[in-house]
């Protein structure tokens, strides 16, 4: 699941995931930069 962080004036939105542990025990957070289009982000 992705959570909103901030939204810019050009409608670009920054979202992030919860903390995920990989197979080596490292903690990872995914960050996405999204901009809406006619169909989706």
Image (spheres, grey):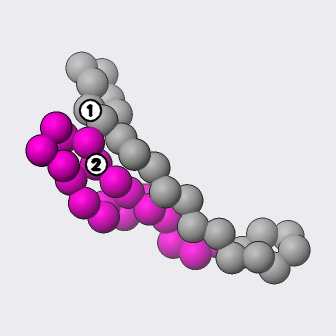
Does residue 37 appear left or right of residue 32 in this picture?
left
Q: Which residues are magenta?
A: 1-20
Instruction: Look at the magenta stretch and give its main secondary structure.
Output: strand
CA distance for labels 2 and 1: 9 Å
Foreground residue among 27 and 38:
27
Residue that badge 2 annotates: 13
Foreground residue among 33 and 38:
33
Q: Tell me: residue 18, above or below residue 4.
A: below
Q: Can residue 1 be seen here?
A: no
Tell me which corner region of the image, top left, top right, bottom left or bottom right, holds residue 27.
Answer: bottom right
Does residue 6 appear left or right of residue 22 in this picture?
left
Cβ atoms under marks 2 and 1 closer than 8 Å: yes
Q: Is residue 14 magenta?
A: yes
Give the residue at x 44% y 62%: 16
Q: Earlier in the sequence, mark 2 or mark 1?
A: 2
Q: Residue furthest right?
A: 24
Q: Which disc number belongs to residue 36? A: 1
Give the residue at x 87% y 74%: 24
Helix, strand or loop status at disc 2: strand
Q: Is residue 21 magenta?
A: no
- Few, some or many residues within 10 Å of mark 2 (<14, 14–19, 20+): some
Tell me which corner region of the image, top left, top right, bottom left or bottom right, holds residue 39.
Answer: top left
| Residue 2, horizontal then vertical, whole percent | 43, 59
């Amino acid at each position: 699941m992705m959570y909103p962080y901030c939204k810019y004036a050009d409608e670009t939105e920054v979202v992030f995931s919860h903390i995920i542990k990989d197979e080596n025990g490292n903690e990872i957070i995914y960050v996405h930069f999204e901009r809406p289009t006619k169909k989706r982000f």
